Image (tube, rainbow, N blue to C red):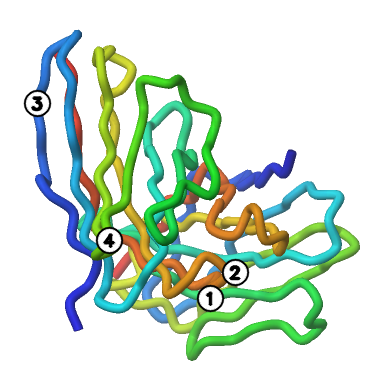
Amino acid sequence: AQTVTQSQPEMSVQEAETVTLSCTYDTSESDYYLFWYKQPPSRQMILVIRQEAYKQQNATENRFSVNFQKAAKSFSLKISDSQLGDAAMYFCAYRSDRVQGAQKLVFGQGTRLTINP
Amino acid sequence: KAGVTQTPRYLIKTRGQQVTLSCSPISGHRSVSWYQQTPGQGLQFLFEYFSETQRNKGNFPGRFSGRQFSNSRSEMNVSTLELGDSALYLCASSLSWANEKLFFGSGTQLSVL
């Protein structure tokens, strides 16, 4: 079974600074997807960024980028120019590429990110 | 386009009762999945439906069940509620079972007293 580990329960950063959230995962599969989701106080899970395992290039979405190290099974999220609206719980998630497990996401425990003005 | 709609937002039940939660996916989305979120266990996959068929099920007791209707709307039911069932129940939809982009609703917060 796949597992996802986020070793930082809480992180804080000054507004406009850069912060990196860590995530490691364990799997025996070679094809899969990795995601970072954000959960603000509204409770809705919002997709921040996704990475296909077969792609060597790291995904980027505006101020958000990832450092995907497949061999090390590491998938960190970098937030540049942090904004107050980035404050939320961040979850790392894994999804098998096998058809049977199409919509089953395995989540980490989350990292609560605080932005200091 | 409206997002994923979950009703009700909050629910209070007592032990032994049963509860039904509803999820309306984004228009055109045919796949719906459900997750349970608790402080202790985190986010755990419950089940997934596509074209009214359950495609995958997580490791939950038989008290947890669900179904999907022909319009892709989904319901989940929990019978004989236990205190440990208190959680945020999140629903997510996607275009199809093979599409990896999930869109989540804001959840139903269930409290069992």
Q: Is residue A56 above or below residue A22?
A: below
Q: CA distance from mark 1 to mark 2?
A: 9 Å
The image shows residue B75 at horizontal and vertical percentages of: 25, 45
Which label sits on residue B12? 3
The image shows residue A60 at horizontal and vertical percentages of: 59, 86
Query: The disc numbered 2 marks a residue on which chain?
Result: A
Q: Along the polypeptide, which appears first: circle 1 or circle 2?
A: 1
Considering the numbered disc 2 on the image, is that residue within a helix, a strand or a loop? Answer: strand
Q: CA distance from mark 3 to mark 4?
A: 29 Å
Query: The disc numbered 1 marks a residue on which chain?
Result: A
Quadrant of the drawing holding the C terminus of chain A: bottom left
Q: CA distance from mark 1 to mark 4?
A: 31 Å
Dot 1 crowding, Cα within 10 Å, few <14, some 14–19, many 20+? some
Check disc 2 and report the residue beneath it: A77
Q: Are marks 1 and 2 in contact (CB under 8 Å)?
A: yes
Check disc 4 and report the residue beneath it: B70
Q: Along the polypeptide, which appears first: circle 3 or circle 4?
A: 3
Considering the numbered disc 1 on the image, is that residue within a helix, a strand or a loop? Answer: strand
Snapshot quadrant of residue B104? bottom left
Q: Is residue A112 above or below residue A63?
A: above
Dot 2 crowding, Cα within 10 Å, few <14, some 14–19, many 20+? many
Q: Amino acid at mark 4?
A: Ser
Q: Amino acid at mark 1?
A: Ile
Residue under disc 4 on the same chain as residue under disc 2:
no
Snapshot quadrant of residue B88? top left
Which label sits on residue A49? 1
